[in-house]
Image (spheres, coloured by chain):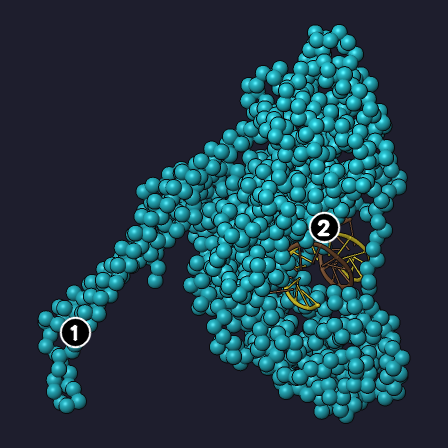
Chain colours: A cyan, B yellow, C brown
Amino acid sequence: MQPTATASIPPPADMDLQAMQSMDWLFKKERIYLLAQFWQQRATLAEKEVTTLKEQLAGTNVGYETKDGNMEKPNFESEIAAKDKEITHLLEEVQRLQLSITKLQESSMSQISRLEDELEQKRQHIVRLENRIDLQRDYEDLKREIGILRSVNFSTNNPESKSAEFLERARSEASEPPVTQDNEGKETGIPNFGRPESDLTDERIAHILNEASHIQMKTPCEDSHSNEDSKSPHGQCSSPFSRELQKQKLKKYENDDIPQEKVVKIYQEELAKLMGKRIEDFRRDPFPGMFFPHLFSGASMDRTQEEIRMALDAYHRELAKLNQCQNPAQMTNLGLLALQQQALVHHHNPSVNGGAQDLSLPKDKPKMVNGIEDKEKDCDDSVKHSGSAFSLVRPKIEPGTQSQTTSSTASSPLSNSILPPAMTPTDDFATSAAASPLQRMASITNSLISQPPSHQHHPTSQRPLKAVLPPITQQQFDMYNNLNTEDIVKKVKEQLSQYSISQRLFGENVLGLSQGSVSDLLARPKPWHMLTQKGREPFIRMKMFLEDDNAVHKLVASQYKIAPEKLMRTGGYGGTPCGTPLGKPMPPTQKMLSEAAGFLNKMQENQNLLPPSLQMVSPQSQMPPGHGQPMLLTPPGIPPQHTISLQQSDHHMKKSSPHGIPHSPLSQHQNNLRNLNPHISPSVYEMAALTQDLDTQVITTKIKEALLANNIGQKIFGEAVLGLSQGSVSELLSKPKPWHMLSIKGREPFIRMQLWLNDTHNIERLQLLKNERREANKRRRSTGAGAHDNSSDTSSNDTSEFYHSNSPGPGPPSAKKQRVLFSEEQKEALRLAFALDPYPNVATIEFLATELGLSSRTITNWFHNHRMRLKQQAPHGMPTDVPPRDQSGNQAPFDPVQFRLLLNQRLLELSKERMGLSGIPLPYPPYLSTNPNLAALIGRGLLPSGDMDLSMLGSVVKEQMSGLDLSMTSLKREPDDFEDDVESNVGSEDSNMSGSLHGGDVKHEPKETPLAQIARSSRRKPAAPQWVNPEWQDEKEKQSSAGNEVIINGVCVMQTEDYGRRSSEETVRVEPTPVMDRFEDDQSDTSSVNNDNDNDARVEHCEKDNEEDNKNSEFDNVHDDSDKPIKHENEDERWDY
DNA sequence: TGATAGTCAATATC
DNA sequence: GATATTGACTATCA
């Protein structure tokens, strides 16, 4: 018994704005509070009981007779003592819990202050970011100012303004981000890649700079050390100086409080020095990289570049942060700067001239050859600028330990992963991530040049390369010389599970290991002392990961790339308000989820059908209709809109709450959260995760009605509202899965539908869009004469153009891929094969592929699709038609001979039907009667009974021997109805006559009774849930032991109690599109018991399912022994049904 | 390697 | 032309 309503809990005393920042604490506290309350209640009860007992003891004199006949008083004393003990225990418990509360309060205070600090920092950062949006312009302004000042300077110091001009030119071209000039000499900001590089030769630069160096005032340090700098990578003078320079430059943008003159001077000096050195180097060895590429890239050359890199690094970092916002405009800025910087590399590097051309290669592509050197020198500086939170994956490399570095590319996958998709690991990025900012910028540039911006989120192009993490340094080994691997693993697992981080993501980004390895490590961590140095590395990384507060957030954010990929199609996700600097790319944090979950759950108490967030007018309605930017007509998970939704739903709650539930802490949280951080609101995914129930059937029915009534097609609806294709919409509408069966992703469309339904202008908008499309089509027809009628109107309207404009322009709209079309016979064969073995092994697949003249891939796909679709067709609460795969691979083997024989039967039947002979019964060969499997098939009506036309059989057999003739077409039939029968055929003894035909191809494995087969559970374990309210997790833990919940597809939780209620009382699904026709043939033959299921449209399924249910009921007992808290969905459904 | 969920898009059907 | 079906594919997980 739990203390009842949350509403009865007084809000914690310090429920204020600050506390809102720490929702997890709040939840913990609340829970503890509840527990304390609970225990206290129990203590009181126990006390009462004791009192009662004492009274009884005092007031009664009853006794009982012992064996020896003596009367004895009941031992109330001991009972009282026990109760007293219990009371003590309970009171202790209460005390303990109260202590916990106090502790939590304390810790929360520190947490709050920390959060405040963090917030303040972020605010500052935002301010800085805002200041830097115009970075490029500032930069160029500065450049111009330099030019002006230089001219003045030179004019006063040297009448030879010509040299000043030259110098300026050299300067601007060699050291500043190259900015092309248009005819008017106006800077366009576009890098001039086309300009001949020889335009400014090094000799000329040298000349100019030599001239200038005589003219200019130089610092003594510079004079005396310029040469040394070129030799020594750690020049005493230049490094501090350049750091100073960098600082100054940064300050310029942050404060603008440095006198420009000074800045200019610094620039000039630095540039002159750099250029001087460059020339020196070049003179000494015109082709250094050719002979000593490592030295070249690693020492002098780099030294000079390094300083400029450092100066530009600030830009890079800030722009990268800006880029997090995925704002196209900012992307442009970034791109420009990247281009400029790349150009700078080109210009600044003498290698661009003539023979030394290839010397730039190690810079731009610091991969195979020079990767090591690049990394070694770059990490020195660039590491310092890397995001601190993820420094663990690019462990700080001490100068002294650098030489140990053996990593070839030294990429930092984690830092890659936190880049926005546009910057995520393409080849270049992955390899250059650890390189200098310039290299990174160059990579970005390359990427920008080679990819249209809309490709930013293409999932395939950004697939991270296998991570190669820098090795753990000796220092780190020393630091972690003894770790509790189990503990680490436990914590890591908690983190991964809590934040729904996949093992793959974690492995690739944090450990540099594959998912499989991670799984192994996490499942079976070896004790520290048993590990080799190498084996310890991952644990050290894990430890570092755990110690980095930000790491998990970044990882979560990077995992979110899924969402942007999807949502960016509408610009929705990108519309996320910025303010999420690199360090905090706005993952929906635990707190937020808890918050929203609490709220949603609370809301659901008050509303039967819908989660509160959905009970609202689509925020889109607040936008001017026909707004230029095409968007989904329901918010695609855009936080701002959701904010509205929360507000509205909150409002709704207040209005509609029948129970008048006052402001519970939860709703108060919500309010506060909303006020505090309007932009931190759940996305559609989060809403999906946080919504415990939603009647998909009702939603789809409503949608269908609405579409039908208004003559709106699935296509336009799908594209405009759901971002899905017509086919998908059709499936969704006709076969909506119950909410609890859907993964988070699968829930998304339903959320959108609901949002759309709540939009008061939903129809208007769609009509508007429809009209627009129609007119656009008309226009196109009249003007374009249908010249490029590539895909009818599919991708030619606004919305879909928007959706599909991702496809890069280049290349013809690839010719329509022709779909494989199975003939009826092929289908029949596949169905038969499926009936025999729904999980064919490779050999079987190959056999089938050969037999049917299809590719293995096609066969695999078919099986997969068939399994999935059968599953889908199973009504709610029904067991699926696909038995779980045999865990040990002992599925009754697929027997080619049996397959062929059965197939022959089927084909005969088909031919007969075609020839109008369907009434004539066919005999089956004698052995069939001895083969229970086949007999079962026959019994179920799969196979005809009666006398067989032997001549036909002969001909079919002939056909078979020469390969099946699968060209026939005839009746349709689903094997779905008989596969169960095959499975249910207890004690089958098939495949004994296997062998001669392709026998070698097919393994015959030890058999197992179907009972055992079915009783076995799926080999898949439920995956870690994603975006499930952590609060639920706890409850789940409690509940799951009762076996009433199951995690589906690793992403959603099925409340089987609900489920049972649902299927028994609530929703009886009536499929709008009956699928009966496909099962007609077999229905009459179904000998199973019909359990009077009132689902008309699903009768045949119910029959099957009931049948299977009956069959399986006995297996359930087998399973009941298992104490597995989480069961396979099939099993669960079976149990609940 | 192989399983599942989700989806697209070609094709079929109404 | 709208909708349904279905082969193919990606992403993710174990």
Count of marks, rendered view: 2
Hey, which quadrant is residue A618 in on the image? top right
Question: What residue is drawn where x is 59% and y is 24%?
Answer: A248
Q: Which of A1114 and A763 is in front in this view?
A: A1114
A199 vs A744: above or below? above
At label 2, the amino acid type is: Thr
Do the residues marked 1 and 2 share a common chain?
yes
Q: Is residue A436 visible?
A: yes
A463 vs A871: above or below? above
Q: Which mark is residue A76?
A: 1
- Whole-percent x and y of residue A681? 52, 42
At label 1, the amino acid type is: Phe
Element at label 2: helix
- Whole-percent x and y of residue A185? 79, 17
- Disc 2 is attached to a residue of which chain? A
Question: From the viewer's perspective, is A126 left or right of A364?
Answer: left
Question: What residue is drawn where x is 33% and y is 56%?
Answer: A35
- Residue indicated by mark 2: A460
